[in-house]
Image (cartoon, helix red, strand yellow):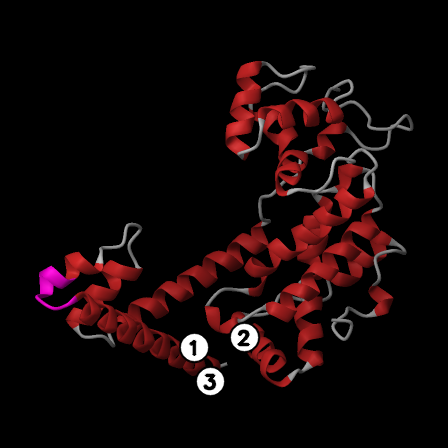
């Protein structure tokens, strides 16, 4: 993935303030341009397109990395690791699946940063299982919700509640809590003796910024409009079967639909598959038509 990388002049290891100013020069891409660039990279190996996708999301990486600034690691390194996750997201992104790159990339960015923290922070010496990661990154947030920040050892009720919420063993909750609060501190107490940073910085803000939320709302509205339009390309039976099988929280069984229509379950399945293929084709044509008006 080395061919996909932001310009070296934008490396965050140097002047962080300057880096943050520079990446603001890369605007968010409209959905149509993002789709074209992603298709060009996926189908033609266009690395210029891939680099544009990466640089247009550098602000998203920085925003997510800032949420982990309380772990005592250089911000430049956290952003660099997040950029690696962003590159991996671009490499694996499929624009035909119908969602924006930012939505897909958030997982890769967070995963890259969290892996770096777990391997770098000297406090964590017990391995990096999924359960330990859950505890490491969520324990303080859950304690805050329970108003148990000022406690030493957690009460049995809180231990049980956290273990159930994260699906981990109660003994792991007790062990991790003692590692992270030896002793516990006020949220406004400084992390280090020089007064740099407070304990409240440990609380990771997973909320999206207004810019990201607006983009996702617009994208969701666009997809819903395309879906509604595409459903009109199906006949009544196809539309009903597809809706009951694919668009319900609790899908109707093949058996129930076969009895309703007086046909075999296999025939219902065939209609469902055919209707879904027609729906995909209609939505793809709508996307291509929209691109033609750019």
Residue at 71 percent of width and 46 percent of height: 114
- Vertical relation: 265 (above or below) 151: below
Residue at 76 percent of width and 41 percent of height: 69
- For the N terminus, give its image quadrant: bottom right
Q: Is residue 279 magenta?
A: no
Q: Which residue is mark 3?
A: 292
- The earlier-in-sequence mark between 3 and 2 is 2
Residue at 53 percent of width and 64 percent of height: 100
Mark identifier at residue 35: 2
How far apart, in angstroms, are the residues tagged by discs 3 and 2?
12 Å
Q: Which residues are magenta?
A: 258-264
User: Can you tell which quarter of the image residue 158 is in?
Assistant: top right
Marks 2,1: beta carbons within 8 A: yes
Q: Position of residue 112 (x, y in %)?
A: 71, 53
Marks 3,2: beta carbons within 8 A: no
Element class at badge 1: helix
Element class at badge 2: helix
Q: Which residue is mark 1?
A: 287
Instruction: Depth check: give the residue in front, 19 or 74.
Output: 74
Q: In this rendering, which labeled residue sits more in front, label 3 or label 1?
A: 1
- Vertical relation: 142 (above or below) 59: above
Label 1 crowding class (10 Å Cα cut-off): few <14, some 14-19, many 20+?
A: some
How far apart, in angstroms, are the residues tagged by discs 2 and 1?
9 Å
- The earlier-in-sequence mark between 2 and 1 is 2
With 158 as the anchor, is 232 left or right in this view?
A: left
Q: Position of residue 169 (x, y in %)?
A: 58, 28
Residue at 68 percent of width and 35 percent of height: 136
Instruction: Depth check: give the residue in front, 22 or 202.
Output: 202
């Amino acid at each position: 993935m080395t061919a996909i990388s932001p310009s070296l002049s934008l490396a965050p290891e140097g002047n962080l303030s300057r880096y943050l100013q520079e990446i603001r020069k890369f605007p968010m891409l409209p959905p149509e341009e993002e789709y074209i660039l992603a298709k060009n990279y996926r189908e033609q190996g266009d690395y210029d397109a891939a680099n544009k996708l990466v640089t247009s999301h550098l602000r998203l990486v920085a925003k997510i990395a800032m949420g982990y600034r309380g772990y005592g690691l250089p911000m430049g390194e956290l952003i660099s690791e997040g950029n690696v996750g962003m590159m991996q997201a671009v490499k694996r992104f499929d624009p035909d699946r119908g969602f924006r790159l930012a939505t897909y990339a958030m997982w890769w960015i967070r995963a890259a940063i969290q892996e770096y923290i777990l391997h770098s922070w000297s406090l964590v010496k017990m391995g990096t299982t999924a359960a330990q990661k859950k505890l490491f990154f969520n324990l303080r947030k859950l304690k805050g919700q329970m108003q148990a920040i000022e406690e030493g050892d957690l009460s049995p009720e809180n231990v049980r509640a956290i273990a159930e919420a994260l699906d981990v063993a109660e003994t792991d909750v007790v062990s991790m809590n003692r590692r992270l609060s030896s002793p516990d501190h006020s949220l406004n107490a400084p992390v280090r003796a020089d007064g740099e940073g407070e304990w409240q910085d440990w609380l990771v803000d997973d909320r999206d910024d207004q810019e990201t939320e607006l983009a996702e709302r617009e994208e969701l509205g666009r997809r819903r409009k395309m879906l509604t339009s595409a459903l009109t390309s199906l006949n009544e039976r196809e539309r009903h079967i597809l809706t009951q099988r694919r668009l319900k929280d609790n899908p109707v069984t093949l058996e129930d639909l076969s009895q309703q229509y007086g046909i075999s379950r296999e025939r219902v399945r065939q209609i469902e598959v055919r209707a879904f293929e027609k729906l995909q084709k209609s939505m793809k044509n709508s996307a291509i038509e929209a691109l033609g008006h750019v």
